[in-house]
Image (spheres, grey):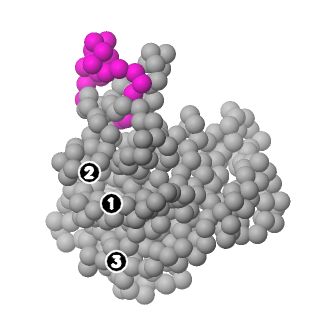
Amino acid sequence: MAGSLNKKLGVLGGGQLGRMMCLAVANMDIAIDILDKDHQFPAGQFANRFVEGDFKNYDDVYKFGKTVDVLTIEIEHVNSEALHQLKAEGIIVHPDPSTLDIIKDKGLQKQFYEAKGLPTSPFVIYDDFIELKKAIQSNEVMTPFVQKARTAGYDGKGVAVIKSAKDYHKLLQVPSIIEPLVAIEKELAVIVSRNESGEIAVFPTVEMEFLEDANLVNTLICPARLEGNLNRYLTNMAKEIMIAYNVCGMLAIEFFLTKSGEILINEVAPRTHNSGHHTIESSLTSQFEQHVRSVLNLPLGSTKMRSPSVMINLLGAPKYSGPVIYQGLEKCMQLEGVYFHLYGKKETRPFRKMGHATIINNNLETAMQNANFIKENFKIISNQSV
Ligand code: ADP
């Protein structure tokens, strides 16, 4: 079944992003096939066809890719050799496998910005941990600094913030990049999409607050509270980055606004992103529908805001690990303009992303208050502890 467009769309990854992509286009009768390990994963219920397999495995990706017309991703860490081969055999692959190869390696990503003259913090690549240790001993690398694994990191898992020698035990023994610790005023994100016809659409800038220690987005605020013409500057820069990468689909760009007022690119993801979840309710087109529109070369939807919004991630409470129990849901559902998205994960773990909630309100302050009410009253626990 190919749905309304007579084109088969395949997605590598069946987590919450894949699930929300399936849901976003179900009304348009666009069918999505998904490849991931277990049909019990979040997208399992909503995929047109869920193929069990490993998106890191060449054969699994190749075989799956041969059954669709257009192939895209919900996660970067997929087998890219298979994507190159599929592209060579005529399957449309978005993002382009060569672009994906750059983006999924933080070292290559940083070198890309350097080569294109795009603003990012200085960095040094250390492929050998012994070399990094020597550089630290000889004060070539001095605290405070941030170490990032070149590949396979996500949600802060490949990031070590080394404030002083006391943090050396956190050093990652993998090929990595070292950056100075930036004095961050605000973390911002812009999502931008592009289709093959070259149409580009940019969503309004969002502001992100992170959970200390876990490096996970805690609260997202849209529109970002920015002075002067910073939003316009970021919108133009997002277009420039999109054109430099030549991506079709979605590109989520994370920026740092530094205490001295500089804008630095932190990193990008060539897919739908946590910083765009609010668009489901707060924008005329959601990021998930936009991604599908762009990879299928359909006209892009309007990115105009319907309403200011706050998005909070709903994470597994610390100390609980086991079958999930949602506590306080009914109380929080009584608030006006609150939309819960629970991803259907059967098991909770400390800080596991189990869902999110978007709160819309014409008054951003009221939306913030309602978000705080949910943070205090909604808990994801289990009757089993860690
Ligand atoms: P991930 O790919 O896991 O999301 P990021 O590169 O986005 O990793 O880093 C996660 C978080 O760590 C950032 O959102 C930011 O809060 C913090 N961080 C990353 N790099 C720096 C830096 N150079 N200076 C200060 N904080 C940083």
| Image-based side of 309 in relation to 107, left or right | right
Q: CA distance from mark 3 to mark 2?
A: 29 Å
Mark 1, secondary structure of its residue = helix
Mark 2, secondary structure of its residue = loop
Could you tell me if the residues under marks 2 and 1 are in contact, i.e. CB atoms within 8 Å?
yes
Which quadrant is the C terminus positioned in? top right
Could you say which is closer to the camera, residue 266 or residue 83?
266
Is the residue 144 above or below the residue 375 in the image? above
Is the residue 20 above or below the residue 259 in the image? below
- What is the total number of numbered labels drawn onto the structure image? 3
Residue denoted by label 3: 296
What's the magenta region? 127-149
Tell me which amino acid carries mark 3.
Leu
Residue displayed at 46% across by 60% down: 228
Q: CA distance from mark 1 to mark 3?
A: 25 Å
Percent x, y of residue 36: 44, 57
Tell me which amino acid carries mark 2.
Leu
Could you say which is closer to the camera, residue 265 or residue 87?
265
Task: Report if residue 148 lies within the magenta region.
Answer: yes
Percent x, y of residue 321: 67, 39
Mark 3, secondary structure of its residue = loop
Residue denoted by label 1: 237
Residue displayed at 58% across by 76% down: 306
Q: Classify 10 Å Cα crowding around label 3: few (below 14), some (14-19), many (20 and above).
A: many
Residue denoted by label 2: 118
Tell me which amino acid carries mark 1.
Met
Is the residue 384 above or below the residue 315 in the image? above
Q: Residue furthest front?
A: 228
